[in-house]
Amino acid sequence: MTIYHLAEPRHWEAAVAAGSYTQSTRGRTLEEEGFIHCSSDAQWPVVRRSFYGDLAGPLLLLEIDEAGLAEPPVIEVGNPQTGETYPHLYAALPVDAVVRVTELPAPHGR
């Protein structure tokens, strides 16, 4: 199965150099948040609009093959009001598990 993560280019570039990605979400690291936020194919466009709408530069959509992860994602409620669940990674994301990187140009709020 494939899951998705939105990354700022500078964080992904650092991850490629280091071999693993540790940014949880905009402005927060795995260490600070406790996990890396991910989305399904249907969820990432909503996350893009909701959390990155004001970002002036491009974003990267990371497509993650779950088979490349040492630990499977944990599916948890991400929105208590709706009960909607999201995949979360409780370990650093190995760059080798990312099978495709797509640049998404701004604006992101549409």
Image: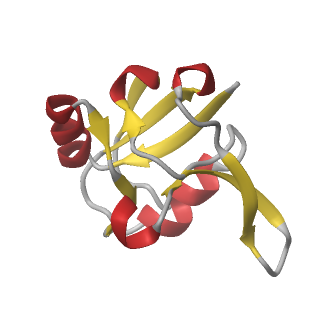
Residue at image coords 38%, 60%: 30
* 108 displayed left or right of 17: right
Q: Position of residue 17 (x, y in %)?
A: 14, 31
Residue 21 quadrant: top left
Residue 51 vs 91, above or below: the answer is: below
The residue drawn where x is 82% and y is 81% is 81
Q: Quadrant of residue 101?
A: top left
Colour theme = secondary structure
Q: Is residue 85 visible?
A: yes
| Horizontal side, residue 41 vs residue 56: left or right | right
**Seen from this angle, which residue lies furthest right?**
83
Q: Position of residue 66 (x, y in %)?
A: 61, 27
In the displayed structure, 11 sits above or below 13; it is below
Q: Which quadrant would the N terminus be assigned to in this image?
A: top right
Residue displayed at 34% across by 50% down: 106
Number of on-image labels = 0
Residue placed at 23% from the left, 47% from the top? 11
> Where's residue 70, x and y in %?
53, 30
Residue 94 shown left or right of residue 65 in the figure: left
Q: Nearer the viewer, residue 55 or 33?
A: 33
- Residue 16 is left or right of residue 72, and the answer is left
Q: Nearer the viewer, residue 50 or 101?
A: 101
Residue projecting furthest to the front: 70
* Residue 18, placed above or below residue 30: above
Q: Residue furthest bottom?
A: 81
Res 110 visible: no
Residue 20's spot in the image, x, y percent?
30, 36
